[in-house]
């Protein structure tokens, strides 16, 4: 079974996808972490977010994602970078490099490969990102599009980062949403057959329960 969860920054995708995967005994793949790791590679090599930069960054990219006790462990060139890919610098760069066609093609390829391994080995996978339901797995068994008001998303992100800079976070988030949803390559968009869940006033447990119930329905209907 393949479950696609897409949505803008701070909509609760990661926490929700992780909880859904745990409840259903599925694997979890955070595709944003992959774009973040590529962004770190650009930064480390001093490359610009251009087609040329992409060629250099991808030519020696050694990216690994493995499930760990506290979530996904991301390694770049054999070293764990799970923390490093969460800095504001990497966040901004990830939004830029994810616009590049060559980067997207390589990431989508890897995501399909990893998901296939997981569906072969286990019962399925929950993938979380921006284009999972539209591009990576247009035939996913269940597609969910999570949204929430910008103010609430910024509030959540500030709390998560233990930061008092909510206004600045909100501004940056708005800029990133705009870039992610207006880019030419695979923009952030709700797939026509995705179930939209607005998490603005929702209790976390309820939103997870709703997706788990939807997955149960699909499983019975599609026998996946
Ligand atoms: O979900 P996130 O904040 O970790 O994602 C980081 C950046 O990666 C985000 O600005 C958009 C990009 N991204 C993407 O283009 N496609 C995905 N499937 C996942 C993330």
Image: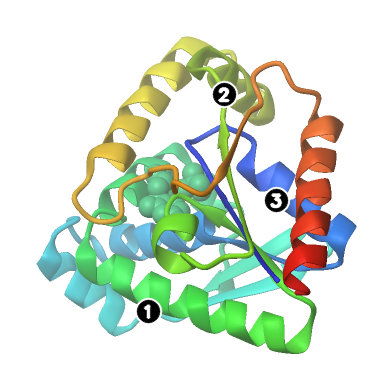
State yes or no: discs 1 and 3 in contact (Cβ < 8 Å): no
Q: Residue at x 69, y 81 (%)?
A: 119
Mark 3 beta carbon near ligand 1 (under 8 Å): no
- The mark nearer the N terminus, 3 or 2, is 3
- The mark nearer the N terminus, 1 or 2, is 1
- Residue 142 in which image quadrant: bottom right
Q: Residues within 10 Å of mark 3 (few under 14, many from 20)?
A: many
Q: Work out how far the residue at label 1 is from the one at label 3, CA to CA, in angstroms.
A: 26 Å
| Image disc number at residue 148 | 2
Q: Nearer the viewer, residue 60 or 196?
A: 196
Residue 61 percent location from the top left of the image: 37, 79
Looking at the image, residue 215 sits to the left or right of residue 104; the answer is right
User: Where is mark 1, residue-wise?
Assistant: 61
- Residue 35 vertical placement versus 94 (above, below): below
User: Where is mark 3, residue-wise?
Assistant: 17
Residue 19 seen in render: no
Q: Residues within 10 Å of mark 2 (few under 14, many from 20)?
A: many
- Helix, strand, or loop for circle 1? loop
Residue 136 percent location from the top left of the image: 44, 67
């Amino acid at each position: 079974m393949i479950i696609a969860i897409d949505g803008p920054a701070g909509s609760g995708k990661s926490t929700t996808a992780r909880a859904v995967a745990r409840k259903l005994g599925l694997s979890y793949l955070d595709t944003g972490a992959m774009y973040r790791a590529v962004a770190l590679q650009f930064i480390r090599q001093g490359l610009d977010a251009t087609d040329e930069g992409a060629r250099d960054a991808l030519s020696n990219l050694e990216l690994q994602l493995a499930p760990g006790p506290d979530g996904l462990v991301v390694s770049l060139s054999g070293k764990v970078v799970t923390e490093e890919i969460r800095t504001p610098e990497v966040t901004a760069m990830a939004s830029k490099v994810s616009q590049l066609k060559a980067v997207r093609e390589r990431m989508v390829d890897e995501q399909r490969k990893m998901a296939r391994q997981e569906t072969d080995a286990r019962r399925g996978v929950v993938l979380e990102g921006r284009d999972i339901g539209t591009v990576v797995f247009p035939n996913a068994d269940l597609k969910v599009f999570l949204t929430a008001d910008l103010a609430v998303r910024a509030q959540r992100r500030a709390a998560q980062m233990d930061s008092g800079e909510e206004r600045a976070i909100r501004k940056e988030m708005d800029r990133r949403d705009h870039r992610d949803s207006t880019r030419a390559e695979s923009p952030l968009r709700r797939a026509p057959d995705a179930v939209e869940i607005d998490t603005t006033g929702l209790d976390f447990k309820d939103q997870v329960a709703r997706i788990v119930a939807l997955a149960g329905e699909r499983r019975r209907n599609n026998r996946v």
